[in-house]
Image: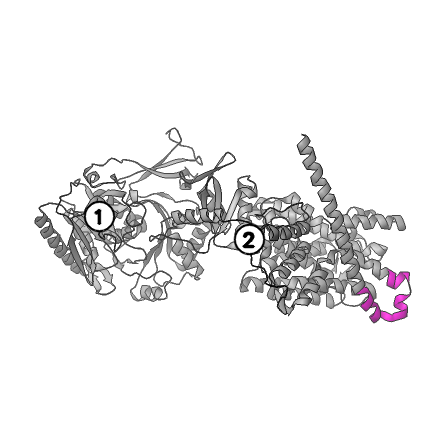
Amino acid sequence: MPEANEFWQLTVGKASDLALVDPVLGPISYAKLTAECAAAALLLERHAKRLGVDRLLIGLEICARSPVIAVYLAALSAGHVVMVAAPDTFAIGNQLCEIYAPNLVIKMSGDTCSFTKLTDKPADLHAELRLLLSTSGTTGDPKLVRLSAENLQSNAAAIAEYLGLHTDDRAVTTLPLHYIFGLSVLHAHLQAGASIVLTDLSVVDAEFAPLFAASHGTNISVVPHQIDLLLAQGFRPDSLPGLRHIAQAGGKLAPVKVREMAGLGRKGNWSFFVMYGQTEASPRMAYLPPNVAEAHSDSVGKPIPGGRFVIRDEDGQLITRNQIHGDLIYFGPNVMMGYARSRGDLAHPRDTFELATGDVAEFTPDGMIKIVGRKARFVKLFGLRISLDQVETLLRGAGIESYAVAVDDQLVMMLPDMQAQDAARGLVATAYDLPKTAVKTVFLKTVPVLQSGKPDMKSLSALAKDAVQTQVSTIGQTETLRRVMADATRRSSVPLDESYTSLGGDSLGYLQVQIFLEGHLGRPLPGWENMTLRQLQALTPAKDNTAAFWSYLDMDVALRVISIILIILVHLGRLPVGGGTWVLLLLMGYSFARFQRSRLIEKQFRDVLVRMLHPILLLYAMLLMAYQLVEGDVSPLYLVLLGNSVPAGQGGVLTVYWFVSLYAQVVAVLVGLFCITPFRQWQMRNPWLSTSFAFAVSTCIAVAALWLLPDPYPTDKYPGILGNPVAVRSLEVCLPIAILGMMIQSARDARQRLVTMICLIITCVIFPETFISQPFILATGGILLIYVRAVPVPTTLVRMVSVMAASTLFVFLLHNIVVYLVRTATPIQALIGLPASIVLVVPASFILGHFAKQLFDAGDRAVSSWWHSRRRNNATTT
């Protein structure tokens, strides 16, 4: 006879207490549920007598309705064996029916249960056996888990204990009851004498929150997919008034989301439980206490009451040291009796006394269990055995949702975010020291899920295989685009699975490729720089060579051209329109974050330095050599990139090139920041917040420097708001502006943009120059960059401005030659006046810069081609 405290006996809850709330029949007390269970038990007894058996094998199509739950509890109480499945499972010809031949099939029919006899043949059922469940949470799987009365009862008691359930708790169903997780919610709450509100609503349905509030719910249980939906919908700490806890199981939740949910719970005064289990464990094996969830977000916690874990190595020996991977084994009274694959297996005694979870895990120094992967989810690449689960964890830790699949010894990552593909490949390639070409990515439009809410891995594998097989290239189109990208990134070739950003492209080459793409597609393509060459060549080109009249001009492109024009005007006529240099510095930080952040996160420091400083330092060196030949008095400070320390007026023609020295210094500092591991990891997790911190620190350093450092060049400084002169060309003052540009690029929502704008205004107030135009122009440019990412203009103008912007580096370096010729070397400006000089010098500077760029690019390609050819010849000879 079963003990009186088993949950199916309904002895804990008071007779008058609420047990269930049926969506049709309404509230049902424990007394009423007990009576319904007794009536159901009599029906089952009559059927058993008609069949001439003591115990029935029942196929139960369970759902969120009280009549079928009463039958389920009655069957457990009477000692029958219940094969639980989803509605409409036990149809004629169903594999489960044919293999196991249940005596009865019971399902909901209207507001009552229907009983259908399938066979008179008695089933040989082991005395301890009570429940049969699919191993996968799907319906119709013929391999079933055999669970005993002890399995069910011990696990229900353990769950109720660690969740702290009491009679005043009330769960609202969010999971199907044929799924062991959903069923365990029912078991644990009945064990505690608590109540359950039955509903088929999704947690993100508009009606769910009102139902939760109206029925005085306190608890919900969810799988990772449901948490994703909640967070995407803007779930808040107070979204469910009266909430006491959320329990999560059904798959690994990314640590970042564990921390987010635990933080929401802390703010809302409710608990967030992470749980770990399997159907074979009835189902719960471990839980993560809410008070340590944020600190141990990558752990599944500790064993449930009555359970224990061991970890074994490949030879079966116990691993007792922390942080050593091995096979995770569980022991406890909730471990299944074993599997069943036929009706005859239902008579077998318990043959499983320890549960090999199939997970690879380690003990943490704090005694927690950390799952590092599944034994079966590995792919071998270049001699490395790589855990697909660890790959997913790595990417989700970086905020990239991913599903890793092995396809014929290839690692394929399926990503719902197409724009994240390059970053994902870079992170994985760096983490496992793989070539990027060994890491495949596939765009996943929708994530297939099982009825349990878990990702459908079979469907994901099939989708990945199809995508890999159909990835073909259109040669002619690809080669044209490939050449353009190779030219823009100064590479000899471009692999199909590389993007402009992954190739280390910069803001100047970006415009070159964008012009080509807009001409090819007949439309702008936002975010193209993060798409691979393969993805770009698959896009549909324009049907003719005509484009729409209107197009969009990126604000950073427009500001780049305007800034250069302002610089030319200042140098030509000493006009009070300074500030263009500061806007260029802001744009430099913006482009740095846009194009180089992902490469720095991948620790490609040397490559970033080379690409950021080439060709500007090469051109700068050529100009210095030319000046030395003509004038012969180049200051050593210019040679060692300290030209920004030379007082204004003492550098002659070279004075305008102080910005090159500053540019190199800023690049070195920013790359150095990413060499600091904690900062680099913070950038990966939260780019805007980490950049904001860097801005705050750099601003404090700048303010301190203004107070503490000596004043070597008083004539080159301007009175600032702090009462001290401001060295407008010094690294300490200019660095915050570049970092501010990074903040602007990283800002993703209204709050971040507002804070960034406030920081911009503070910068302009603290560090003003002589003319009000300088902080005003910086503030205007920054605000436009924050809030207006692109403006509609005629397509012809977009292309013209883009061509001008692509040459701005060369215009900056060479415009002073034009200015010198017009203003100093010849009497042109004196003859035609300043307005006409402006009309002459500005276009002439851009024309000179454009042709200089074409000449330089041709030479650069020739040298690069020669160098790569030489390397190939040397490799062949070797």
Q: Residue at x 39, y 58 (%)?
A: 269
Residue beneath the point at 20% across and 37% down: 348
Q: In the depicted view, which residue is nearer to us: 132 or 277?
A: 132
Does 755 sit left or right of 835 as displayed? left
Mark 2: amino acid: Gln
Q: What residue sits right under mark 1 in the picture?
A: 97
Give the percent coordinates (x, y) of residue 525.
59, 60
Q: Name the image quarter holding the C terminus.
A: top right
Look at the numbered disc 2 and give the secondary structure of its residue: helix
Quick check: 94 left or right of 254? left
**Residue 258 included in the magenta stretch of the image:** no
Percent x, y of residue 454: 37, 51
Q: Main secondary structure of the magenta part?
A: helix
Q: What is the quadrant of residue 265 in the picture?
A: bottom left
**Mark 2 highlights which residue?**
535
Using the rendered image of the protein, determine whether residue 159 is visible from the camera's viewpoint. yes
For disc 1, the neighbor class at 10 Å (few under 14, some 14 to 19, many from 20) is many
Q: Which residues are magenta?
A: 821-842
Residue 4 in percent (x, y) is at 16, 48
Q: Is residue 304 above or below residue 200?
A: above
Determine if residue 710 is in view.
no
State the residue in front, 368 or 618. Answer: 618
Between disc 1 and disc 2, whose residue precedes?
1
For the N terminus, the image quarter is: top left
- The correct choice, above or below, for 736 with respect to 494 in the image is below
Secondary structure at badge 1 equals helix
